Image (tube, grey):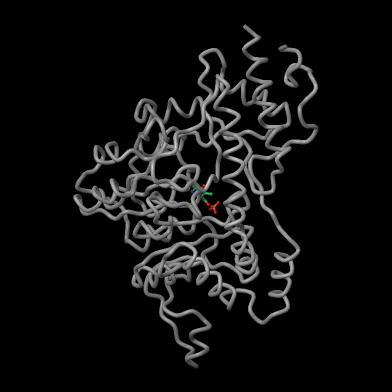
Amino acid sequence: MLESLALYGGTPIRSTTLPYGRQWITEEDIAAVVEVLRSDWLTTGPQVAALEASFASMVGAQHAVAVSSGTAALHTMMAALGITSGDEVIVPTLTFAASANCVAYQGATPLFADIDPATLLLSPPEVERLISPRTRAILAVDYAGAPCDYSALQTLAERYGLHLLADGCHALGAKRDGHPVGSIAEMTAFSLHPVKHITAGEGGMVTTQDPILAQHIRLFRNHGITTDHREREQRKEWQYEMVELGFNYRITDMQCALALSQLRRLPDFLKRRSAIAQRYQKAFSTISGISPLQVPEGVDHAYHLYVVRVDSPTIDRNLFLRALRAEGIGANVHYWPVHLHPFYQKRYKTGPGQCPVAEAAACCIVSLPIFPRMTDRDVDDVITAVNKVLLGLHARL
Ligand SMILES: *Cc1c(COP(=O)(O)O)cnc(C)c1O
C-alpha cells in the first residue's frame, strides 16, 4: 500500500501537476487588451473608469477605485483613514502577510486576533479582547471566500467607535445574509492577481459607499496630487497641488481592459467554483482522516480556496501535503499565521501561544486545487489522490 504512493516510488495519479489555482484567459480577453494598445490611453484612461463602474455595481458599492495591487488597495484604505504611528488595527492572524503589512506601512501596530475553530474566520470575542484606547480599526478577512460575521463585528465597531474594514481578496462575489462583500464594511480591498476570482495580471480595487473616502483613495493612488492629468487637461490648467504624501498606485488601461473582460464571466466562475466545492464536499463526507471547514449560516461562499483539515491523529499534515504533491496535486497551506513570521516576532514582539486556535489550525490545514477551468476529471483526480494518500499513510502504521 505504502509503496503505491508516488512519494515512495509508486505511479503518480497525474503526470503533470495540477496547480491550486490559476487564471482562465480567453481570446476575447486578449482582444480587449490588444485594442487598448492601439488606443490613445495606456493608463488612467477610459478602461480604468469602465472597470471601476462595473465593479462597483457588481458588489453593490457606490464607489470603486482601481489600484495597482490588492496590497496597494489595503495600504490605501489605511492611509485614507489616517492610520498612523501610535494607532492599532486588529487583524486576524490566519491571513496573507499583506493584511498586516498595510498597517505596518503606516507605522501603526497590527494586533493579531485569533479565529473561530470551526470556520477559521476572525472571532468577534477575540477582537473585543484586544480593543484598547489606541485601537482605530478592525480589518476583517473573508478567509477562503466566506464572509466574516459582519453583524457582530459591526456591533463592536459601533460600541467602541472603530472603523470596520474588509480584506475581501478571497471573497469577490461572496455574500453574508444577502449583502455582497464590497458593500458591507466601510471600505473593502480586492485583488486582481491571477489566482483570485478575476485577474488583471496584477491589480486591486477599493470599494466604499463614502464619496469622501473614495476621493481620498484617488488622491493617495496618485502621489497625493489633487487632480489627475486627464482632469487637468479637461480644465485646461497646468497647475497641480500635492496635498499629502501618496504613492504611484495607478493601474494601466491594459490591465483594466483584461479585468473588465473577466468580470463579465464572474458569475460563471463563481458557479463553477461552487460546483467543484460541492463535488469535494460530497466525496469527503464519507471518508475519515480529513474534514472540510464549516460554512456558517447566511454565507454565500466564493470558494477562492477549498480548505480541509487533516484530522487523523496518525497522519502528519506535512507528510500528507508532500504525498499529495508527489501524486501531481498542487496542494498548499494558507497560511502560516502572520504573528509567527520573523519580521513580526522581531518588530512587534509577537510569538507562539498568542493565537492558539490559529496556530493549531495552521498545522493541519491543506488547500486543495480549485479554479474554474478545472474539469470534472481534474476534480476526480484530486479526490482519488486524497483517498490514495490517506489509505497509504494509514497503512504505514
Ligand atoms: C492576494 C491577497 C492579498 C494581496 O493581493 P495582491 O494583489 O497580491 O497584492 C491580500 N490579502 C489577501 C487575503 C490575499 O489573498
Pick the front one: 335 or 135: 335
Q: Quadrant of residue 324?
A: top right
Q: Residue at x 63, y 79 (%)?
A: 41
Pick the front one: 309 or 42: 309
Q: Position of residue 273 (x, y in %)?
A: 59, 46
Q: Can residue 108 be seen by looking at this rendering?
A: yes
Q: Quadrant of residue 257?
A: bottom right
Q: Is residue 108 above or below residue 203?
A: above
Q: Residue at x 44, y 32 (%)?
A: 340
Q: Is residue 104 left or right of residue 335?
A: left
Q: Is residue 275 left or right of residue 29?
A: left
Of the 4 image quadrants, the one containing the N terminus is top right
Q: Residue at x 46, y 62 (%)?
A: 59
User: How many circles with numbers are drawn on the protein?
Assistant: 0
Q: Residue at x 71, y 74 (%)?
A: 37
Of the 4 image quadrants, the one containing the C terminus is top right
Q: Position of residue 190 (x, y in %)?
A: 49, 56
Q: Is residue 174 above or below residue 205?
A: above
Q: Residue furthest top?
A: 397
Q: Is residue 146 above or below residue 209?
A: above
Q: Position of residue 40 (x, y in %)?
A: 66, 82
Q: Is residue 130 left or right of residue 27?
A: left
Q: Can residue 100 be seen by looking at this rendering?
A: no
Pick the front one: 264 or 128: 264
